[in-house]
Image (cartoon, helix red, strand yellow):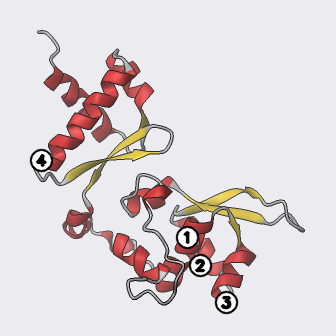
Amino acid sequence: MPITQRNKIGMLEAMLFANAEPVETDRLAEAMRADPAEVLTLLEKLQKRYDETESGLMLLHFDGDRWQMATRPYYGEVVKRILDTRRNAPLSPAALEVLAIIAYNQPVSRSFIEQVRGVDSSSTVSKLMERGLIEEAGRLDLPGKPVAFRVTDTFLRVFGLGSLADLPPLHDDPQKEEELPVQQTLEELQ
């Protein structure tokens, strides 16, 4: 049986479905014994098909040319119900605030976070690390060599982002009515 374009898209779909983590285009191409440029075209066609059919699925394209199948945020509530995510309590306002500070300014130290928030953030940072939303990103070249934090791919997946470039812009002019606080912006993405 000859391999058609539809078969190749099906192969991609199956591989992405089977992987819990993002997969590099080159790795997909190697598994399919295909050219990476062809695989990229097929991935774009698959995403277009998902968009045109209003599928509950979407493809996330991460930095480093990595791809992952995900549920569209619109269907998040029903997916949460079926997966019984009570064990993953919603993020607190403090956690959303810390995530926003890190996402928009990374890499940052704990003292930077606390300076922006005006309160101790140790427990919030620890909880976000436990949930895999942030990680250590080495040490900053500052007195005391403080640990730097950055958001993870898990953060990007949870908020339906392909990269930090997809974050909504922050407005510089506090007088603008359309300005949203960072916390509200992240809540809308969740």
The crowd level at tag 4 (other Cα within 10 Å; few <14, some 14-19, many 20+) is few
The residue under the point 32% across, 26% down is 39
Picture coordinates of residue 104 (x, y %)? 56, 67
**Which of label 3 and label 1 is nearer to you?**
3
Q: Which residue is mark 3?
A: 119
Relative height, residue 185 to residue 107 (above, below): below
Q: Earlier in the sequence, mark 3 or mark 4?
A: 4
Element at label 3: loop
Q: Return the residue nearer the eye: 53 or 158.
A: 53
- Quarter where residue 120 is shown: bottom right
Residue with the most extreme top position: 1
The answer to whether residue 89 shows anywhere in this view is no
Q: Amino acid at mark 3?
A: Val
Tag nearer the camera, 4 or 1: 4
Distance between the alpha carbons at the discs numbered 4 and 1: 36 Å
- Residue assigned mark 2: 124
Which disc, if any, is residue 163? none
Mark 4 highlights which residue?
A: 52
Tell me: 115 left or right of 162: right
User: Circles 1 and 2: CB distance less than 8 Å?
Assistant: yes
Residue 11, percent across and down? 24, 27
Under tag 4, what secondary structure?
A: helix
